[in-house]
Image (cartoon, coloured by chain):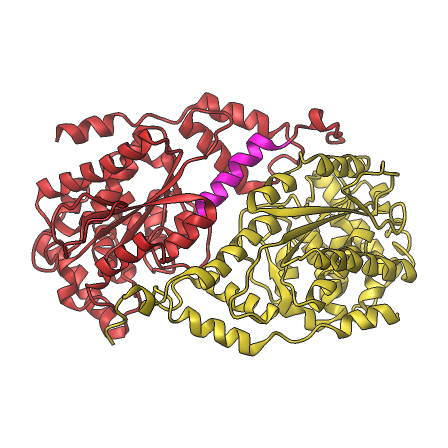
Chain colours: A red, B yellow
Amino acid sequence: MNALQTLLSKIEAPDVAAMKAAQARQDTLTKPPGSLGRLERLSLQIAGITGSARPHLHHKVITTMAGDHGVVAEGVSAFPQEVTPQMVLNFLHGGAAINVLARHVGARVVVVDMGVAAELPPHAALVNKKVGRGTANIARGPAMTREQALQSLLNGAAVVEAEIERGLDILGTGDMGIGNTTPSAAIAAAVTGRAPAQIVGRGTGVDDLGLARKVAAVEQALAVNRPDPHDGLDVLAKVGGFEIGGLAGAMLAAAAHRKPVVIDGFISGAAALIAVTLAPSLRPYLIAAHRSQEKGHRIMLEWLGLEPVLDLDLRLGEGTGAALAIGVCEAACKVLDEMATFAEAGVAGRLD
Amino acid sequence: MNALQTLLSKIEAPDVAAMKAAQARQDTLTKPPGSLGRLERLSLQIAGITGSARPHLHHKVITTMAGDHGVVAEGVSAFPQEVTPQMVLNFLHGGAAINVLARHVGARVVVVDMGVAAELPPHAALVNKKVGRGTANIARGPAMTREQALQSLLNGAAVVEAEIERGLDILGTGDMGIGNTTPSAAIAAAVTGRAPAQIVGRGTGVDDLGLARKVAAVEQALAVNRPDPHDGLDVLAKVGGFEIGGLAGAMLAAAAHRKPVVIDGFISGAAALIAVTLAPSLRPYLIAAHRSQEKGHRIMLEWLGLEPVLDLDLRLGEGTGAALAIGVCEAACKVLDEMATFAEAGVAGRLD
């Protein structure tokens, strides 16, 4: 537990002075005060996170973490488990949606094997942080041991630590893992206390029978495992996943280094629930990329107290929403940094 | 009227075959069908508009059109009229929000003087399409003559025709004009039949008294001028503005050349009401960039039948929302064009 406690203790409060300086500059820029709405608020949040009154987001990284889930045995996914490693290869070859959208916003995708059930061929761009070959079936017992849960957090943190050394300015989180909306729903039910039926959605697109199986699997997972909602590590071990733990660790490490974290959709939301349960001080570092089509995502965002940047009916995962929202965050910082002031441009102010 | 009728008659229905081909391709890409939500729908819309099953948006242009408004005499704006030409200079020097956001998405800003009250110094990047030195006060009589209304439409169309020759792939519309939320509200009230009090908002930030003056000015404008809601040219002449007419003309010209049009906020919305009244066939070419903070914008979007891409509490105008939404449109087209198919990537399909 020592390494984790050290990590959690490093997360400081946002820099209020930097936020105030950013607000003061916003008020001098050639636009009616507040007229850029969310862009202005994002710029202030990122100023507070980074401690810079004019933050720059040059190095944008999306960590897409993959893992498999024993709960697929309950028939909770519309796709077969072999799609997880197949999609990891697709990420490595640049053909997936996350590759296209990351290129679009100038972000780098870091593909991480946190716990894919298959052995993946070595690839220069694949980060191997495998904790196990898929989790156990949460409907029958714990997903992993407490040691594995800790390891997945630390492995995820290590991925971000390595990127920080290469100059990361903003982190986006993404996931791949057939079946992973089921443990994510279980985490959300455990942490928020809401009923599984209110949270479980169709994931990649199960039919009504599949949806009923998912609800039953989550109910069973909670009944069998009884996760302690106040102990993030316990929730992760009992009903989580390796990539979910990795993403939670990545969020904590980014915040410990004062970097903003753009969380993607439902799976990243579950990881954020774990991470915020472990360290409530993480919350101001989080930016919710979008409101997912996946039913329980609203409940997660409500619990996290986050207003999503985008609402584009996405439900793909991989970090696709995070990529687009990182583009908006960068735009927000550029507005703060690059716009002319009323004085510089010789523009008259308000009449009153 | 001949030139206008020619323009209107050129707007054809979207290409259904291209849309179907785009949909067929979307269904083969490595993601659950429909999981990229609005991005997928945008790609289909743009396929239909352009007649290409894999459209590319290389050349992105935002026309920011400026004009002044006699109705400022009624005390309807928080800023003095000289801000209009001052902001035009700011656009030309690259210091305004639209410059920052257009650079961010790789779009070019085309700054157009449609009817600024001051004489602007010549500038290589300023397009002079001045129809008059500001409109007359709509609370006392018509904004302009019917001939001027026609001229403003044709001048706006000519700006886009010139850009089409330089290779425009997508048009964003933006505005600058102190006082221009007042004629825009009057247009919305005239076309939709809703009461001015339901539509008039705070614009750049008037206080309660200013807001009451704006409502009164719009009510008076409608009572004095009695615009015919079925005659777009009449509405434009009686309660419109030169930049509003220019934007309406720009939209019509883009559609006549099968180019998608991303309309910004409240002022571009008013221009779209005029343009769609003139040519209902324009509607499928329009993409609403965002939902503005300005109160009546929802009413405009409802009438236009458009769902905004973004909802970021913006109310600046200039084309700032359009710039960000153009970035999303480009992302949507890249997804359609660049993603690998299940067959190409060797990824298994659904279980059922």
Report how many numbered discs are placed on residues in the image.
0
Instruction: Quarter of the image for the C terminus of chain B: give it.
Output: bottom left
Using residue B271 as the reference point, say whether residue A10 is left or right of it: left
Q: Can you say whether B79 is above or below B243 in the image?
A: above
* Residue B222 seen anywhere in this rendered image of the structure: no
Residue A88 in the image: x percent, y percent? 26, 55
Seen from the viewer's position, the closer of residues A321 and B78 is A321
Q: Quadrant of residue A6?
A: top left
Image quarter where the N terminus of chain B lies is: bottom right
Residue B260 appears at what percent x and percent y?
Answer: 62, 62
Does residue B349 appear in the picture of this structure?
A: yes
Residue drawn at the location 79% of the way across and 68% of the way down: B229
Q: Which residues are magenta?
A: A325-339
Image quadrant in which you'd find residue A116: bottom left
Give the side of residue B49 with respect to residue A133, left or right.
right
Q: Position of residue B51 (x, y in %)?
A: 59, 72
Judging depth in this view, the residue of A44 and B137 nearest the camera is A44
Magenta region, main secondary structure: helix
For residue B68, side relative to residue B44 (left or right): right
Q: Looking at this view, is B88 or B273 the one in front?
A: B88
Q: As displayed, is residue A153 above or below residue B136?
A: above
Reply yes or no: does residue A329 show up in magenta: yes
Is residue B278 covered in magenta?
Answer: no
Rendered location of residue A195, percent (x, y): 24, 58
Q: Residue furthest top?
A: A17
